[in-house]
Image: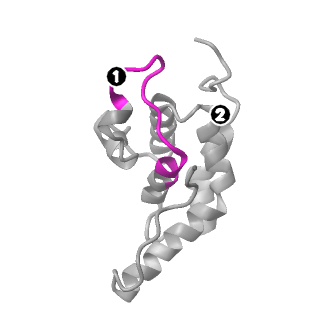
Amino acid sequence: AKVTTIAAIPDGALDPMAAAAAAKVTAIVDKFKDTILGFHNEVGGRVTAIHDLFNHIALTNKRPPLPPQAVAMLLALKKEQTTPPKPGGPTVEEAQTLTAFGHMVEPTDTEATFETKVISIVRERLGGPHSARLVF
């Protein structure tokens, strides 16, 4: 069974301000879940394609590209997902991709700013040369 939401945080596990921030992140990611999962499914969850997207998002927002270790951490890449090596590289589950996008939400972000800074770039990349439909 596929999990397609960010993992829930138990009630009382956070102080009220942190709980409100976590709820905001979840709401923003949920708003754009179809777009995020559209990209995830288009690339077959391939980490290399997701890494490329994250770097494009970073560079577009005048930030440095992300090293592979940072992407592995954002995606919570598990050792069993990397070994044995697969053609096309490791893949992640939908929930891992959604959680990684949740890490991109900044405290000052609104749905509109997140859409401009992040989701608009995801939409540009849909159907692009990274697509799992293309054979390399």
Asked if the magenta segment contains residue 95, the reply would be yes
Q: How many other residues sit within 10 Å of disc 2, few (<14), some (14-19) or many (≥20)?
A: some
> In the depicted view, which residue is nearer to us: 120 or 132?
132
Helix, strand or loop status at disc 2: helix
Residue 8 percent across, percent down from the top left: 47, 69
Per the rendered image, the range of residues in magenta is 82-98
> In the depicted view, which residue is nearer to us: 11 or 129?
11
Query: Disc 2 and disc 1: Cα gap in Å?
Result: 23 Å
From the viewer's perspective, tell me whether residue 98 is left or right of residue 17. right
Q: Main secondary structure of the magenta part?
A: loop
Give the residue drawn at x 62%, y 13%: 135
Asked if the magenta segment contains residue 90, the reply would be yes
Q: Is residue 104 above or below residue 122?
A: below
Give the residue drawn at x 37%, y 20%: 85
Image quarter (top left, top right, bottom left or bottom right) of the C terminus: top right
The label on residue 84 is 1
The label on residue 44 is none
Residue 111 percent across, percent down from the top left: 61, 67
- Please give the residue where the numbered disc 2 appears in the rendered image: 42
Q: Earlier in the sequence, mark 2 or mark 1?
A: 2
Residue type, numbered disc 1: Pro
